[in-house]
Image: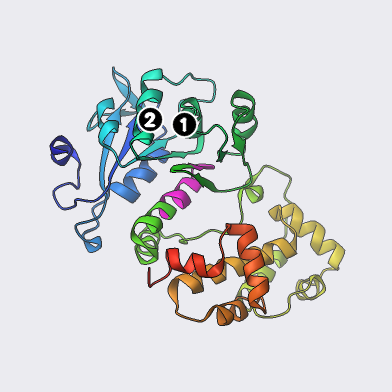
Amino acid sequence: MTRIAKIAPNATTTAGPLVVAPVYDGLCTFEFAIAAEVFGLARPEMGPGWYRFASAAVESGPLRAHGGLSVTSDGGIELLDQADLIVMAGWKGADVPVPEALAKRLRKAWQRGARLASICSGAFVLAATGLLDGRRAATHWRYADQLRERHPAIAVDAGVLYAEEDRVFTSAGSAAGIDLMLHLVRSDFGVEAANSVARRLVMPAHRGGGQAQFIERPVPRDRTNRLSSLMDQVRADLRAPWTLERMAAASAMSPRTLLRRFTEATGQSPGDWLIAERVAEAQRLLEASSLPVESVAAEAGFGSVQALRHHFQARLGLAPRAYRSSFGLGR
């Protein structure tokens, strides 16, 4: 650990988990920057237990990144042996072989208890280790079919922003990497820390929905902005009984037209979108307030604890009280 303490940019003020991001020729600049921003930026307000961060060159020779940048790393591939968390920030391409030396180091790291995470095409690197076999994993929707074909033992889920199973974390497209990194911060340091980092990034601590809303499809032009206005109106009053008919009336459309336009524009039906918004509001209330679960259900528009529990379990795999235990203020 002495070597890391000398090279990690924030090691002089922190002593928390060591996060290492492998770098390679053709480095995905944005994906790497996500990891560096979340884990490598000095955050003295977080105290001495905050993350340490280092980059590790996993191949020799001059290294370049997208955008014409030259890359100088903190150290070599051996840094992976000391990491508590390894973030594979993209990869050169779905068709580019993963060096066995890198795959072997990643397997050893996981076997000794480290966590592995990938952003976007970085899932192909984790797949090469065999650690995703039999597990659920995410990647960018454009790569999902290729990942399934090359690694049929992986349960590829192209509909989620990120997936987690047995200390292996995978995320979808590049921006979904931010969602995953915030999830890791939330798991390690609690909801307030994750919210603080999210505020610095000027983004929500949680994003509802999955990748379906981003998959390429013809999106009709909404010159009157009726859908946007409707969404704002619903979000402002989630407690109201928003039936399809009420939404249609509020947007001055017929129910059939609203259903068609909403689905074309978002990839979700109005009902599915509404449930996702209510679940997100319930998450926020469970994290940031001490309201009883019954009150959370009412405030989020579910009406009953049973309905809240059903949708929470279906979408997040957790009961509301278990979620609060993991991510609430009293954690």
The reply to whether the C-beta atoms of the residues labelled 1 and 2 are less than 8 Å apart is yes
Q: Residues within 10 Å of mark 2 (few under 14, many from 20)?
A: many
Which residue does the numbered mark 2 point to in the structure image?
Answer: 106
Q: Is residue 220 visible?
A: no
**Upstream in sequence: badge 1 or badge 2:** 2
Which residue does the numbered mark 1 point to in the structure image?
Answer: 126
Task: Specify the quadrant that holds the C terminus.
Answer: bottom left
- Depicted 317 relative to depicted 1: above or below: below
- Depicted 136 relative to depicted 149: above or below: below
Look at label 1 and name its amino acid: Leu
What count of labels does the image hold? 2
Look at label 2 and name its amino acid: Leu
- Asked if the stretch drawn in magenta spans residue 286, the answer is no
Q: Position of residue 77 (x, y in %)?
A: 28, 26
- Depicted 245 relative to depicted 78: above or below: below
Region of the chain picked out in magenta, as a range? 170-182
Q: Is residue 194 visible?
A: yes
Q: Position of residue 219 (x, y in %)?
A: 72, 50
Which residue: 71% across, 61% down? Answer: 272
- Quadrant of the rendered image containing residue 81: top left
